[in-house]
Image (spheres, rainbow, N blue to C red):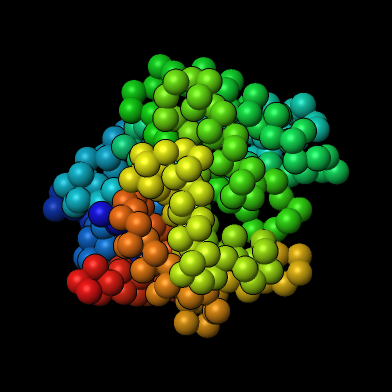
Amino acid sequence: MIRFGTGGTPLSTKIITTKDGAKLSGRESGIYRSAELGLNHLEMEFVHGVRISEKEALSIKSTAKEKNITLSAHGSYYINLASKEKPKYHASLNRVKKVLWAGSLIGAKSITFHPAFYQGRRTDEVAKIVYDALIQIIEETKDLNNRPLISPETTGKPSQWGSLEEILDVAAKINKKTGDFCVSACIDFAHLHARSNGLYNSYEEFKAILKTIESKLGKKALKTLHMHISGINYGPKGEKNHLPLKESDLKYKELLQALHDLKVCGWVSCESPNLEEDALLLKKEYEKTSKT
């Protein structure tokens, strides 16, 4: 089963006041709104930092369970696990650990973040630094209860470290080292499309992506796949900005067909500007595919 939701609180969310007069947080109100809309997933955004109390996090977990909404979490935009500046490198480690902490409390299935930049270095050099950073993070968060999957996101610009192959290679090495399936990948299909300046946009290419994931990380990866789907504007330098699906050239129907045919399970977060409209479009199109 694939569950569909928005990347962040739905735009139409209104703060809910409980019977006793208490106001719920925007995040918790977003869970109620997601359920009202007929969505069944929600990605909590911590892109400007993890600002949540343990009390709120546990309340979110309870509400999500009550409303049958699965959760994922997106970490800070200010993460660079290969920064050449030591203070920024260590701050990045802490930011990943913080979103893992928040994710474990809210019951997130997976957390994601943009992992690194090349900064003039070869891919293998950056990969080694990212590998070491993630190994350290895993060791330092081993006592977290229900630690989510760590799923670095495929990035949208060639200047950013984070191609499909780069992330899968590091994830596979870490899982082999730890003997545990603890690192996967967040596959942002719009980013892959933009990064390649127009490739990765056909049924066969989508199938090839999914088969590559399976070959690198095993069948379990396709049963717990963290995904982002949206329209996107791009050029020779990659991603420019997100677009509504119907205003973009992303062949999302072919993508959904490939996901269905390869029996992928997991969570889709829509990051289009019209968040819930496109999330519902994806969910309804996928349900049509599943009936054929």
Rendered view: 111 above or below 157: above
> Closer to the camera, 102 or 142?
142
Seen in the image, is 72 located left or right of residue 172? left
- Decide which of 76, 278 is in the foreground and name it: 278
Q: Position of residue 173 (x, y in %)?
A: 56, 28
Q: From this viewpoint, is residue 28 visible? A: no
97 versus 277 height, above or below: above
Question: Which quadrant of the view contains residue 78?
Answer: top right
Q: Residue at x 71, y 29 (%)?
A: 129
Residue 104, by quadrant, is: top left
**Residue located at (37% from left, 41% from top):** 219
Q: Is residue 232 left or right of residue 59?
A: right
Residue furthest left as drawn: 19
Q: Nearer the viewer, residue 104 or 155?
A: 155
Query: x%, y% of residue 256?
Result: 38, 67
* In the image: residue 66, left or right of residue 197: left
